[in-house]
Image: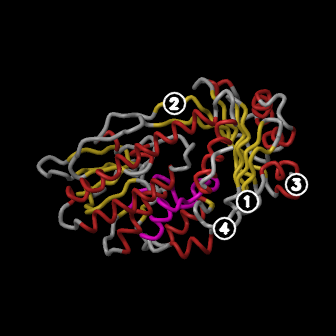
Amino acid sequence: MHTTSHYPIAIVGGGLGGLTAARVLHVNGVEPVVFELEAGRHGRTQGGMLDIHEDSGQKALHAAGLFDEFLRKYHQGGEAMRVLDKQGTVLRNEADDGELTRPEIDRGTLRDMLLDALPEGTVRWGSKVTGVHAVDGHPGRHEVTLADGGSFTTDLMIGADGAWSRVRPLVSEARPAYTGISFIETDLFDAVDKHPAEAAAMGDGALFALGGDVGVLGHKATDGSLHVYFGYRCDESWIDTIDFTDTPAAKAAVLNLLDGWDDALRGLVANADTALIPRRINALPVGHSWGRVPGVTLLGDAAHLMSPFAGEGANLAMLDGAELALAIVAHRDDVEAALTAYEAELFPRSAASARESAEGLEMIFAPDAPKGLVERFAAFDARKTGEPAS
């Protein structure tokens, strides 16, 4: 028979945001518990590279006392970036300047770094949340039921459980909606030796090869593999028209949309070493917020799921986690004051990034793409040098 445990602070979700919150609380003498759906840290592949921004993700790493560790593990040279048109013409090619404004790191490496920095037992693996409700007579207290029949109560529940958050309905009726873009992800291994043409097209860092409704994006990973995202502006049901269990057929369907493209860019799909993984890109409404609900708040994708076209998702999740933890530490005896202070900063910050992401989506998949992206980078250059954009 399961008994109900009580935890003063419970974090639902062991992604980067939840783990950052746990770590920053821990270094400040507060011990939360993290409930994570996955069976263990190696339960699933953690995705590709992340660029960690100076004003968000890096701030969170400093608050977590892990910035020096990050500097030992980031992908040197990974800040390189290139923009191509569909014929493979290089329209912009940036080398990594070594200034660490947006250094890249493997997502799995970053998550392991956070996990290793928490006390044993902080993360309760295999904890699938099936229900959450307020406890009568205890303002701010919630009871959480788990799939294994267990349950617990908490005085501060932090929803760090991503796009389809089980905690979000306590504060908001908002649901993620399809953005009009679908991604297909795949990988090419040992690229320099086995896929030299594709490796040359990708370059040393990030790639944006764009042509209207279709794009081939990606980055070179620390291990020399190429992580590729094929992006397509399409109806939500398009993914359902392809049998992704039949990799040759799935590749043929994607390559049909890359008809007339440069051979090396087509090769990033045609010569992929893994199955093709479909992913619809969803987002919460820009400016998503909620009224103060005692004892509960959200961070990361649970709070502000957005498309990846500003590169902010993981960075914001980590900054959210750090800022929330610091607010809790600053108001140790007043949960509501902590959450009020945190949300006052969270809402405008996430609204600005969500707006930037939505605008980035439109620019990257514009009819005349990659023109807008090239012009945006030229404008950045002009601001740095004080000269007019060419």
Quadrant for the N terminus, please: bottom left
Q: Nearer the viewer, residue 8 or 335?
A: 335
Quadrant of residue 232 within the rendered picture: top right
Q: Nearer the viewer, mark 4 or mark 3?
A: 4
Residues at marks 3 and 2, CA–CA distance in whole angstroms: 36 Å
Secondary structure beneath dot 2 equals strand
Report the label total: 4
Q: Nearer the viewer, mark 1 or mark 3?
A: 1
Circle 4 — which element?
Answer: loop
Residue at image position (33%, 74%) is 28
Query: Amino acid type of disc 1?
Result: Ala
Query: What's the residue at 18%, 48% (across, down)?
Result: 135
38 up-or-down from 173: above or below: below
Q: Position of residue 53 (x, y in %)?
A: 53, 59
* Amino acid beneath label 4: Gly
Q: Position of residue 118 (x, y in %)?
A: 44, 71
Q: CA distance from mark 4 to mark 1?
A: 9 Å
The circle on residue 194 is 3
Instruction: Identify the residue under disc 2.
Output: 178
| Callout 3 amino acid | Lys
56 falls in the magenta region: yes
Q: Is residue 128 above or below residue 6?
A: above
Q: Position of residue 97 (x, y in %)?
A: 68, 64
Give the crowd class for mark 4: few <14, some 14-19, many >=20 residues within 10 Å.
Answer: few
Magenta span: 34-63
